[in-house]
Amino acid sequence: MNIGWLTLLLLLPLVGAIATMLVPRAKALLSKQVALGFSLVTLVLTAIVAIGYQRNGAGDYNETHTWIKAFGAHYALGLDGVGVVLVVLTALLTPIVLIASWNDAEHGRWSEKSFFAWVLALEALSIGVFSATDVFLFYVLFEATLIPMYFLIGGFGGPQRSYAAVKFLLYSLLGGLIMLAAVVGLYVVSAKHGAPSYLLTDLMKLDISQNTERWLFLGFFFAFAVKAPMVPFHTWLPDAAGEATPGTSVLLVGILDKIGTFGMIRFCLGLFPNASEWATPVVLVLALISVLYGALLAIGQTDIKRLIAYTSISHFGFIVMGIFALTSQGLTGSTLYMFNHGLSTAALFLVAGYLISRRGSARIADYGGVEKVAPVLAGTFLFAGLSSLALPGLSPFISEFMVLAGTFSRHKVIAVIAVLGIVLAALYILLMYQRTMTGPVRDGIEKLKDLNAREVLAIAPLVVLIIGLGIFPKPVVDIIKPAIDSTMQRVGVTDKAPQIPVTEGQK
């Protein structure tokens, strides 16, 4: 079997994880350098694939090989615009996390090299998930991503990390088991139409009865709603993100949770378009609840990392809303939101991690006056917060605007109420900044060190991208648009949304 580009992208970090583990335990620095080296090579290769995709389309990156013939399962990888954006996000965040977490694993349950190896393993599996075009392969990789994340949460982080890791695993396994039933159902349906197949291209041609399609949709949607996470399946996230190291939280919220919203686009809309339209009213209400509930709970948090976790629940509500608005503008905005949310939340978690590592506490009440002793840290924290609340001129703004505009064209009441989420976002971010960074210098803050060169190096690419894509989102939108058009054609809903000329840059 010839190794294609996507297989190489998947294998490279996996080989890096093995190489990192083979480094002698006494040579901790070397193991970190090996892991970082593999992640950087993966990023370069991903950039080559993304540029090639933009120039030549998806044809050069499709791979299909028979895997389990009796089940109709294939080792099949391929990219559309949504997958390209999320693979790029995965490859980008991984080296940033490794640099930012250079010393975060020193006091973990296992050796430092284990942390770096698990990060690379998660990168490999995530790339596989975003590239899989066979439902059975997707399911296997979907479940496999739980393994490295479980060990990253349970092996490194806060005192309640074991509890948080088990809770994360149980919720995710429940969603996976429900999806497994739907995967088996797809096998039965495809077998009735001839030879069984799990290839997306074959499944999209099936004529599925209305009731069967709805049950299969619910099986997939439940798993993706848990992963996303949507209210009421969200309670595992604050515990997991609050106890994990900042770098692990970035991977969890920035990459792993995106599998849920990615799955809604590729599988719920792609395979079950009629059922998706049928479920839209309920899903939009759940998304709206997530937007407002997550924001309200964020305001009341006393722990910095838990506050950021609740903001992500609110943001994912916007993403799901844009997906099920069933307009091309809303769907484009949601996909762009996934990428931009990964950047802004990564910046916020990492800067919060820098702050917490210096003070030794995540309690908001233990801070005050930080801007007077560590101005660069405080300024970066403010920038990350403003990005998270979607300040005009920063990349999340155009995403959120497109989601609301796309939703308003078909579901005006939902969109109008969702605007309250923007107001609440400004409230929880500015309150957090005020309580931690301004005012008199509290005891224990006087000797707080400002950001060092390594920490600035980790955060700088995020700052540049947030500003750059806030001014000129055209490169990402151009990649996304063909896949969105194809999905909308599949769903078959008339798109009445006015088109906003984002391709010429944001005003």
Image (cartoon, rainbow, N blue to C red):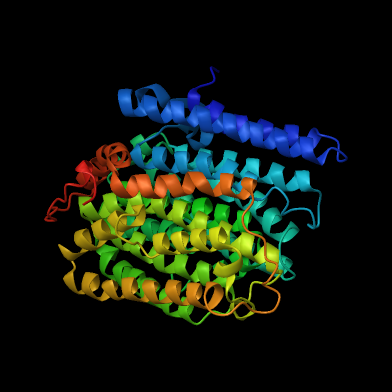
Image: 153 above or below 306: above
Pick the residue in front: 407 or 174.
407
Q: Report x, y in % for residue 364.
A: 59, 77
Q: Quadrant of the N terminus?
A: top right
Image: 161 above or below 69: below
Pick the residue in front: 201 or 416.
416
Question: Residue at horizontal 43%, vertical 27%?
Answer: 49
Q: Report x, y in % for residue 355.
A: 62, 64
Question: Most extreme residue toward the right, as rendered?
Answer: 26
Question: Most extreme residue toward the top, as rendered?
Answer: 2
Image: 421 above or below 327: below
Quarter of the figure with residue 353? bottom right
Quarter of the figure with residue 207? top left
Question: Residue at horizontal 58%, vertical 63%?
Answer: 352
Q: Is residue 305 shown to the viewer in this render?
A: no
Q: Report x, y in % for residue 151.
A: 71, 54
Q: Report x, y in % for residue 74.
A: 49, 32
Pick the residue in front: 412 or 458.
458
Question: Residue at horizontal 51%, vertical 37%?
Answer: 71
From the viewer's perspective, is 57 left or right of 356? left
Q: Is residue 500 shown to the viewer in this render?
A: yes
From the viewer's perspective, is 328 left or right of 184? left
From the viewer's perspective, is 20 left or right of 267? right
